[in-house]
Amino acid sequence: MTGYIDPDRAQFEAFKALDRDHPIEMLNLVKFRDRALYPEGQALANAGLSGAEAYRNYGRDTAPIIARLGASIVWRGTFQSVLIGPGDEVWDEMFIARYPNAHAFLEMVTDPAYRQAVIHRQAAVETSRLIRTKPGTGGTSFG
């Protein structure tokens, strides 16, 4: 798996160019490093944390931020197997975060407390997928 941890500039610009005035749901697929990789000199650089432990630190530090913004985790699942798709994509964490709108998401990622917390995510994650969706309606058919 190729490591995708942060968006590249083109992806972030495309995200920002979309309509911001409706709820968004972000599908998160995350694979952890065996050992967290904090930058040299960071307080936890030599703590020997696993990727999962570092990601829990990220969750702890960002929980008050997402609550303040009116965001929440609306679905969480446990990976079991791939039926269609690359067999090497195995995910340790899978969830959908709902934001009241894209403005709230952008406020989160620019919040100074978030910018400090995201170091845990960067240390924890080997690769990830973060997919923006516009909520639709449920139903009884796939189409």
Image (tube, rainbow, N blue to C red):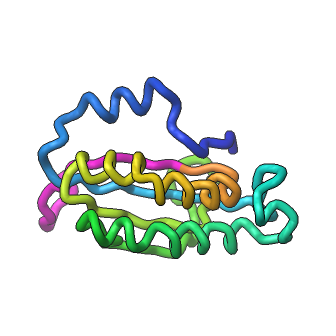
Residue at 24% x, 52% y: name it. 24
Residue at 29% x, 69% y: name it. 68
Numbered label tally = 0
Q: Nearer the viewer, residue 11 or 49?
A: 49
Q: Would residue 69 be found to the left or right of residue 22 on screen?
A: right
Q: Would residue 143 be found to the left or right of residue 41 on screen?
A: left
The verdict on residue 29 being magenta is no
Residue at 18% x, 54% y: name it. 23
Query: Which quadrant would the N terminus be assigned to in this image?
Result: top right
Q: Is residue 9 above or below residue 88?
A: above
Q: Could you tell me if residue 73 is visible in this image?
A: yes
Q: Nearer the viewer, residue 112 or 90?
A: 112
- The majority secondary structure of the magenta stretch comes to loop
Region in magenta: 129-143
Q: Nearer the viewer, residue 114 or 72?
A: 114
Q: Would residue 115 be found to the left or right of residue 106 on screen?
A: right
